[in-house]
Image (cartoon, helix red, strand yellow):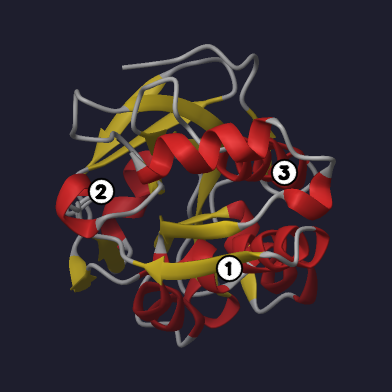
């Protein structure tokens, strides 16, 4: 009833200064600490009467128990009761510290099986799929020196030369430009990952949530390493 009342008062408001209330948003840790945090803060600055509870979580959540308004997740959203829309697709590549790359001759994906790896669970693990620019697919099973479920730990392992790693371009773009990391197998990429946004269906969605989703689409489209999702059609 309260949600319905708030939605009605927002619809009959005089403008963006009347958009108010609370938004609880769950976002992935790395994205939520970096690019998406700036996008969220810009939104709050535009709509200062909206208070935002910004929670960072990589593991699946129970949407109803969490009490959030929307959930931003990398990969599949395991909840058929939610409306799920793709925000963007993320390019990923195999990177390594220059010191490690200089120790190995890598010309084909098979050559990577002689290179130690740091692996990110649950996306890749010990079995990595790579795709060429001509859509040729090859799976490799490299020696895994370190396995982790945290992208920051994975990044540090790659940076310190512990192992090569599959990392998103948006995360390592500056390191590639500075030469701290190298694209060890140009022309081959790991499968892209989709960033999705999920929320409850229903006609009583507050305007502040709709405004935030629109703002998120605009913000993420201009970020390096992201390919904006085409269209706004719902996905399951």
Q: Nearer the viewer, residue 159 or 200?
A: 200
- First in sequence, mark 3 or 2: give its number: 2
Q: Is residue 83 left or right of residue 61?
A: right
Q: Is residue 137 above or below residue 123?
A: above
Q: Position of residue 25 (x, y in %)?
A: 44, 57
Secondary structure at numbered mark 2: loop
Find residue 124 and name its label. Answer: 2
**Residue at 54% from the left image edge and 73% from the top image edge:** 33
Q: Is residue 187 visible?
A: no
Find residue 59 and name its label. Answer: none
**Residue at 22% from the left image edge and 47% from the top image edge:** 63
Residue 133 found in image quarter: top right
**Mark 3 crowd level (few <14, some 14–19, many ≥20, 10 Å Cα):** some
Q: Is residue 37 left or right of residue 13?
A: left
As measured in the structure, the alpha-carbon distance from the residue carrying label 1 to the one carrying label 2 is 37 Å
Which mark is nearer the camera, 3 or 1? 1
Which residue in the protein does label 3 denote? 215
Point out the image quarter for the C terminus. top left
As measured in the structure, the alpha-carbon distance from the residue carrying label 3 to the one carrying label 2 is 31 Å
Q: Is residue 89 left or right of residue 145?
A: right
Q: Is residue 155 visible?
A: yes
Which residue in the protein does label 1 denote? 51
- First in sequence, mark 3 or 1: give its number: 1
Q: Nearer the viewer, residue 207 or 31?
A: 207
Point out the image quarter for the N terminus. top left
Residue 98 found in image quarter: bottom right
Q: Position of residue 11 (x, y in %)?
A: 67, 31
């Amino acid at each position: 009833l309260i949600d319905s009342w708030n939605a009605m008062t927002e619809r009959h408001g005089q403008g963006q200064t009347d958009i108010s209330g609370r938004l609880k948003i769950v976002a992935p840790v790395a994205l939520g600490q970096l690019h998406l945090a700036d996008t969220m803060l810009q939104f709050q600055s535009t709509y200062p009467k909206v208070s935002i509870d910004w929670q960072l979580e990589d593991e699946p959540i129970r949407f109803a128990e969490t009490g959030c308004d929307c959930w931003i997740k990398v990969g599949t959203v395991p909840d058929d009761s939610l409306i799920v829309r793709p925000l963007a697709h993320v390019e990923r590549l195999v990177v390594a510290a220059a010191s490690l790359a200089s120790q190995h001759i890598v010309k084909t994906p098979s050559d990577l099986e002689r290179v130690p790896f740091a692996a990110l669970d649950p996306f890749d693990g010990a079995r990595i799929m790579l795709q060429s620019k001509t859509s040729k697919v090859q799976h490799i099973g490299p020696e895994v020196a370190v396995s982790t479920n945290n992208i920051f730990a994975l990044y540090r392992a790659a940076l310190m030369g512990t192992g090569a790693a599959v990392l998103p371009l948006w995360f390592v773009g500056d390191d590639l430009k500075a030469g701290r990391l190298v694209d060890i197998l140009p022309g081959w990429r790991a499968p892209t990952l989709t960033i999705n946004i999920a929320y409850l269906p229903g006609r009583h969605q507050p305007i502040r949530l709709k405004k935030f989703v629109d703002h998120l689409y605009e913000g993420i489209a201009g970020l390096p390493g992201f390919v904006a999702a085409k269209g706004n059609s719902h996905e399951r």
